[in-house]
Amino acid sequence: MKTIKYLIITAILICALSAAAVVSYSTGTLSNTGVILTGKGALTGVLVITDGTNAATVTVRDAAGGKVIAGPFVVTGASRFGGGTWEIPVRYETSLHLTISGTGASTILYYTHEL
């Protein structure tokens, strides 16, 4: 009986902790190179959007000129969408800096605040 109570309590705690562990946010659609967010956090995904004709390239760094934390993602124009998501977020220490190129290219970044 004690084992069953222990298992039930453990299951409840695991569910409660995992539900509040990571909250992901979205930047909304971005089309300019530059600093997107400042402070510590983690990148959980990148969606690259083309105009349907021209290729798009997106790279995300930890600070301008810093370490590449995602990409470069190169998406052909006809593909329209590309990118990636991660179950284990990629940490950044200073800021998220976006480099985007391609006519009509845009992107949406998914992130968490400091973990």
Image (tube, rainbow, N blue to C red):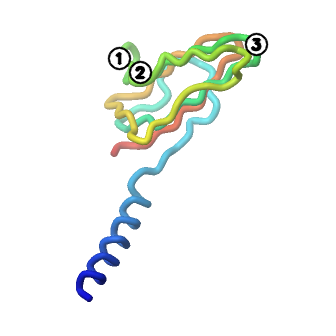
| Marks 2 & 1, CB-CB < 8 Å contact | yes
Task: Please give the residue where the numbered disc 3 appears in the rendered image.
Answer: 53
Give the amino acid at mark 1. Answer: Gly
User: Considering only vertical position in the picture, is 52 above or below 6?
Assistant: above
The answer to which of marks 3 and 2 sits earlier in the sequence is 3
The answer to which of marks 3 and 1 sits earlier in the sequence is 3
Q: CA distance from mark 3 to mark 2?
A: 26 Å
Q: Is residue 75 left or right of residue 64?
A: right
Q: Nearer the viewer, residue 20 or 74?
A: 74
| Marks 3 & 1, CB-CB < 8 Å contact | no
Residue at screen point 39% across, 24% down: 69
Give the amino acid at mark 2. Answer: Arg
In terms of secondary structure, where does tag 3 sit?
Answer: loop
Q: Position of residue 51 (x, y in %)?
A: 74, 18
Q: Position of residue 78 (x, y in %)?
A: 73, 17
Comparing marks 3 and 1, which lies closer to the viewer? 3
In terms of secondary structure, where does tag 1 sit?
Answer: loop
Residue at screen point 36% across, 62% down: 17
Task: Please give the residue where the numbered disc 2 appears in the rendered image.
Answer: 61
Task: Please give the residue where the numbered disc 1 appears in the rendered image.
Answer: 66
Q: CA distance from mark 3 to mark 1?
A: 31 Å
- Name which quarter of the figure residue 109 lies in: top right
